Amino acid sequence: MAHIYEYKPPHKLTALHIRRGLHPMNVHQDVVNRITIPPTEDRDASFQYSAEKLTTSAITQIYHYMIEGGLDYGLLTTGETIVFLKIDWEDPETLFYHVAEPKAEALAHPEHSDLCTAVAQYLAFTLIALNSLEGQHGQEERQNAMGILDT
């Protein structure tokens, strides 16, 4: 298997949720064990909180599958937005990501719109993932990674 793939409906996880909710963070500290929840009257802070919670929930599910499967790559898509994911097995607590919005990117770069399409981005990502299959991560490495991760 080259990578894990997860689909979430765009009415449940919007592009705005992903853009606002996905940023460098310590998920356990900043989301799971968050000390305060913003009041609903503070609409911006409340939306930020919801975006972080929804996005990290979806990403965590895929991350878990990647660790269990010993895979370097995974992706989350809503059909409108794609989040490409990569684990560095030297530091499995760090998950790298790239957010792509193919439609907006194609419109922003009409001279290279063919390279911005979802198909082109999936193809490039899959080729990179296939190239990484040489260094499979065995059961011991996966168990070591699971042992150091907060659960």
Image (cartoon, helix red, strand yellow):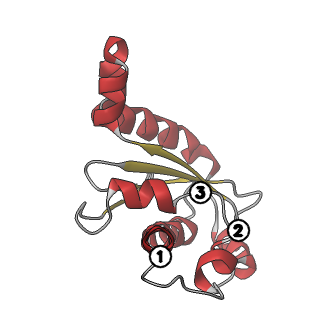
Mark 1 neighbour density, 10 Å: few (under 14) some (14–19) many (20 or more) = few
Say what amino acid the circle numbered 3 marks.
Answer: His
Q: Which label was assigned to residue 23?
A: 3
> Going from the N terminus, do you reach mark 2 or mark 1 first?
1
Q: Which label was assigned to residue 42?
A: 1
72 relative to 19 in the view: left or right: right
According to the picture, the residue beneath numbered tag 2 turns out to be 141
**Distance from Cα at disc 3 to Cα at disc 1:** 21 Å
Residue at image location 69% in from the left, 82% down from the top: 150
Query: Which numbered disc, 2 or 1, marks the residue closer to the eye?
Result: 1
Q: Which label was assigned to residue 4?
A: none
Q: Relative to 117, say whether 2 is above or below.
A: below
Say what amino acid the circle numbered 2 marks.
Answer: Glu
**Distance from Cα at disc 3 to Cα at disc 2:** 27 Å
The image position of residue 8, as x and y in percent, is: 29, 64
Is label 1 in a helix, a strand or a loop?
loop
> Going from the N terminus, do you reach mark 3 or mark 2 first?
3
67 relative to 19 in the view: left or right: right
**Distance from Cα at disc 2 to Cα at disc 1:** 44 Å
Viewer-side residue, 64 vs 56: 56
The image position of residue 86, as x and y in percent, is: 58, 52
Mark 2 neighbour density, 10 Å: few (under 14) some (14–19) many (20 or more) = some
